[in-house]
Amino acid sequence: MIELKNLKCAFENRTILESVSLKIENHITLLGANGSGKSTLAKAICSLIDFDGEVIINGTDIKELSLNDKAKTLSYIPAKLEIYDSFITVEEFVLLGRFPYKKSFFEYSEKDKNITQQTLEFLKISHLKESSVSSLSSGEQQLALIAQALAQQSKIIIFDEPTANLDPHNSKIIAEHIKGLKEYHQIILITHDLHLASYVGSSVIFIKDKTTHYYEDNFFDDATLEELYNVPFNSLAVQYD
């Protein structure tokens, strides 16, 4: 469970989020306008940015966890892959997800390598393992990011705009994987894609006016959407089925 207590995030004297207190006990989708603070909230949960207040993960303050324990607890998947080694292979990239479990000054274990291989096979990208990550398409890169997170075996996975750069075909593939992973991980999804959010089917946290508004099961009706987005809606269709 994730508990936020009086969370505040600010950059360059501009407050993004203020007085956010909530409990996230299950899967959740974060929605809101551009610049509302969706990614900011996710990065605060992961302790990737500075914040005031508390983020409690399963009873422990995130700031008290070691880097390895944070990695075993949370995975953050950005919208776009940025790499600094243009020659790293897919297999090597996914194997990096095992780094929190690796003993210092030792090579990766056979267990680490087996988990990496199993993850590549699960996502059906094992045929790409010798390819350089930089040579992959946007959809393949997104699958590589997911593979690294799965190899990391963290309990909570945060997807930040996972289909933002993808065509409809690859968006459908990623959507199906996200929905399926809810069986094994706690999923936090950040997206502007209401069709994706509806398909994944989690409760919704809508961020507006620097704070959060929780919707358990009544978010995707036209009246609610029109009120929050200030544009007309006519029966949101789920396009991934």
Image: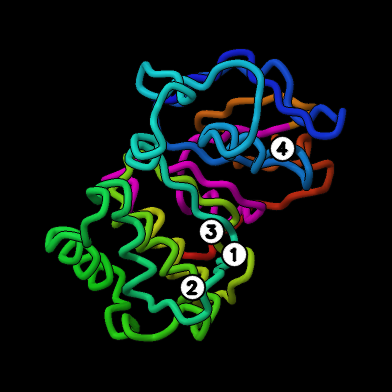
In the current view of this chain or complex, which residue is farthest to the left? 110
Which residue: 51% across, 22% down? Answer: 55
Residue 183 shows in this picture: no
Q: Crowding near pointer 1: few (<14 within 10 Å), some, many (20+)?
A: some
The magenta-colored residue range is 180-207
Give the spatial CA distance, label 2 vs label 3.
25 Å
Tell me which amino acid carries mark 3.
Answer: Val
Q: Quadrant of residue 57?
A: top left
Q: Earlier in the sequence, mark 3 or mark 4?
A: 4
Which type of secondary structure does the marked residue at label 2 adopt? helix
Side (left or right) of 202 relative to 71 = right
Numbered mark located on residue 238 in the image: 3
The residue that disc 1 covers is 80
Question: Does the rendering let one see residue 59?
Answer: yes
Amino acid at circle 4: Gly
**First in residue order: circle 1 vs circle 3:** 1
In this view, the mark in front (4 or 1): 1
Q: Is residue 12 above or below residue 195?
A: above
**SS type, badge 1:** loop
The residue where tag 2 is placed is 141
Q: Earlier in the sequence, mark 4 or mark 2?
A: 4
Do residues under tags 2 and 1 come within 8 Å of each other at their CB atoms?
yes
| Residue denoted by label 4 | 37
Left or right of residue 129: residue 40: right
Residue 186 drawn at (x, y percent) = 37, 39
Amino acid residing under circle 1:
Lys
Q: Residues within 10 Å of mark 4 (few under 14, many from 20)?
A: many
Along the polypeptide, which appears first: circle 4 or circle 1?
4
Q: Confirm whether the magenta stretch covers residue 229.
A: no
